[in-house]
Amino acid sequence: MKIKKPSLLVQIFSGMVLGVVVGYFWKDAAINLHILSDIFMRLIKMIIAPLVFSVLVVGIAKVGDFKSVGRIGIKTLLYFTTAAIIALLLGLFLVDIFEPGKTMLIALPDAADAAHLEPAKGFDAKTFIEHLIPSSIADAMAKNEILPIVIFALFFGVAAASIGKKGKEVVSFFDAVSHIMFKVTNYVMAFAPLGVFGAIAAVVAKQGIGVLTGYVYLISEFYLGLLTFVFVVLFGICMAFKIKFFSLLAHIKEPILLAFSTASSEAAMPKTIESLEKYGCSNRIVSFVLPLGYSFNLDGSMLYMTFATVFIAQAYNIPMSVTDQITMLLILLITSKGMAGIPRASLVVIAGMLDYFHIPAAGLLLLLGIDQVLDMGRAATNVVGNAVATAVISKWEGELHTHKIDPDIDELKLD
């Protein structure tokens, strides 16, 4: 009798559990296992640029013209902005209600303690535009800067669609490239359980098992916020658009767990694209909306930034008025855009907020010890948020057809 191979979901979860055990009992050996995580993340980064560019070109070419692209783009950005505002407000509401910072009771730190934390610069329109429009597409691809790739692919895809037969040949080529990249993605995903194992083992070995249980009140309140956003806000949005929310979650369960265990929504992006198409989202919508979401729709990170900034102010007993908090919300709405791909981008943006409101930047040290745990939740929420966004835009455009049967799900999905 042939033994059925465990699903990727089971393998990843097993890697997480084994990582905790090895990291706790064999610290000296586990401390260096981060190399497995590094290899996996490099493999993921290796495929992102060609995958994103090929699926975008094909998706935009199928849209066909600037009028259609503009219509879908406006709907997408409208959704992203609305979701971002809700996430920011939810983080603000929870931190004001539960006041987790007031449980810390700490003194103002010495400025030298945070000398290694570089404050973020304020919003600079010139820098943002320079980051938005690539001076070299090769350079943007080399750095895996998704937003510049999106801009170039937008022009390339529309141009390919506009020149007729020769353009169709190019689009067919990139369609073949995208399918090849999906196959490459499957090969890379086979390494995911080892990458997850190495990441968890190294974190537990370095910071101790306490990293999973310390700061219990802060962690629990933050995760309450994430769960509220997912199962109240996103569920409500899906209900409004008559999208089967739990069916969608079932299809993206592997990308969610992958993002959670690696603390990287970027790692889950290729698998998310594949899962959403299996769910029934239009290929052209997935190709257009999802890459944009990684620059403009990081819901978990948005919630975290308001939550963390006010938490640090509370920890130092520094009051923030309603006006201050509204100002912070508006600044974060702008400065958070395009932060995808920047290491610990949320912390960098928060550092800028602390500096703006004259809160000690050393307060970030309160979060560094558990940032990995918090980042795991942020990354998973980002995946769910972008999946819902893609499903909503697909439904809005009349291109959501959830009638396909997924072999891992035992029911037929029909709208």
Image (cartoon, rainbow, N blue to C red):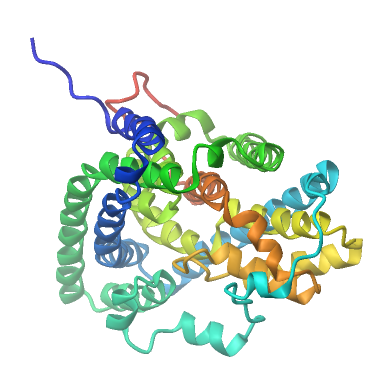
Q: Residue furthest front?
A: 28
Whether residue 339 is situated above or below residue 251 in the rendered picture: below
Residue placed most toward the observer, 173 or 232: 232
Residue projecting furthest to the left: 1
Residue at 71% from the left image edge and 39% from the top image edge: 221
Q: In this view, does 104 lie above or below 53?
A: above
The one of 281 and 113 positioned closer to us in this rendering: 113
Residue drawn where x is 14% and y is 69% of the image: 169
Tell me: residue 272, above or below residue 145: above
Q: Where residue 46 appears, x then y in whole percent?
A: 24, 63
| Residue placed most toward the observer, 344 or 183 | 344
Task: Tally the numbered discs.
Answer: 0
At x 48%, y 80%, the residue is 132
Is residue 379 visible in the rendered image? The answer is yes
Is residue 402 in view? no
- When the figure is inspected, residue 334 is found, relative to residue 193, above or below; the finding is below
- Residue 96 x %, y %: 84, 48
Viewer-closest of 1 and 205: 205
Q: Where is residue 155, by image quadrant?
A: bottom left
Quarter of the image containing the N terminus?
top left
* Image spot of residue 62 (x, y percent): 32, 62
Quadrant position of residue 126: bottom right
Locate residue 209 relative to residue 94 in the image: left or right. left
Q: Which residue lies furthest to the top in this view?
A: 1
Q: Identify the residue at image location x=59%, y=76%.
A: 118
- Res 327 → quadrant: bottom right
Residue 102 image point, x, y percent: 83, 48
Image side of residue 215 versus residue 371, left or right: right
